[in-house]
Amino acid sequence: DVKVTQSSRYLVKRTGEKVFLECVQDMDHENMFWYRQDPGLGLRLIYFSYDVKMKEKGDIPEGYSVSREKKERFSLILESASTNQTSMYLCASSLQGGSNQPQHFGDGTRLSIL
Amino acid sequence: GESVGLHLPTLSVQEGDNSIINCAYSNSASDYFIWYKQESGKGPQFIIDIRSNMDKRQGQRVTVLLNKTVKHLSLQIAATQPGDSAVYFCAENGVYKYIFGTGTRLKVLA
């Protein structure tokens, strides 16, 4: 089974802090994704990566950046956290093949910005 | 509890009955669809997928039906169990990314 592991289940940070969310997958997947999930809005794509050192903006990249230095690890960075970034963050991975492969998700990080 | 499903439509089903969860997708060019299950406090879990060259696909206790004419997808769960209580949402493939529905909460009544 695919295992996508997010480093923290719950995280509380302060406004203005730089925040790192880490995600690791163990299935040698080429593609990795970061989403945020908010009530009534469903999953919104922040960034994705289809290879090491590659990244593409999703629908809501503002205020975020990402890093993919190794194939199995994809980090989401909040450069200067703000209260409107309080949310559930979900990482996913999939095999190469564009959007014709199922994405497998981690259990999420619930981030609160005070 | 999690607030991700705060504003979702809810389907309440008696334990042992069959459940049908519906999804309207947006893009007639989409050719791959997935159903996910999300339990409280967990990430979405892959249930079943279907490609557009099929109308129906069966898994263990689940069946997905695809009607391309009306852009409609449904998930049928046979003999619904308490462990099926969760939020279910569909996803359709777009260009390089998926489009996710907001979901339906399934409540199983004892």
Image (cartoon, coloured by chain):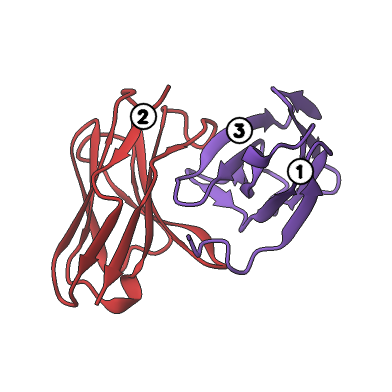
Chain colours: A red, B purple
Which residue is drawn at the image coordinates 54% and 46% (left, top)?
A: B38
Image x and y of residue B40, in percent: 51, 51
Image x and y of residue A30, in percent: 34, 30
Q: Which residue is outermost to the front?
A: B110
Residue that mark 1 sits on: B73
Establish whether labels 3 and 2 are both on one chain. no
Asked whether residue B66 appears in the rendered view, the answer is yes
For residue A95, above or below residue A81: above
Residue that mark 2 sits on: A3
Disc 2 element:
loop
Disc 1 element:
strand
State the CA–CA distance, disc 1 to disc 3.
14 Å
Asked whether residue B54 appears in the rendered view, the answer is no
Residue that mark 3 sits on: B47
For residue B77, above or below residue A41: above
- Out of A1 and A9, give the one closest to the viewer: A9
Identify the subunit bearing mark 2.
Answer: A
Disc 3 element:
strand
Left or right for A6, reference B78: left
Q: How many marks?
A: 3
Closer to the observer: label 2 or label 1? 2
Q: Earlier in the sequence, mark 1 or mark 3?
A: 3
Query: Given the image, on which type of amino acid does mark 1 rest?
Result: Leu
For residue B77, above or below residue A61: above
Query: Given the image, on which type of amino acid does mark 3 rest?
Result: Ile
Establish whether labels 2 and 1 are both on one chain. no
Identify the subunit bearing mark 3.
Answer: B
State the CA–CA distance, disc 3 to disc 2.
15 Å
Which residue is drawn at the image coordinates 26% and 72% (left, top)?
A: A113
Q: Quadrant of residue B63?
A: top right
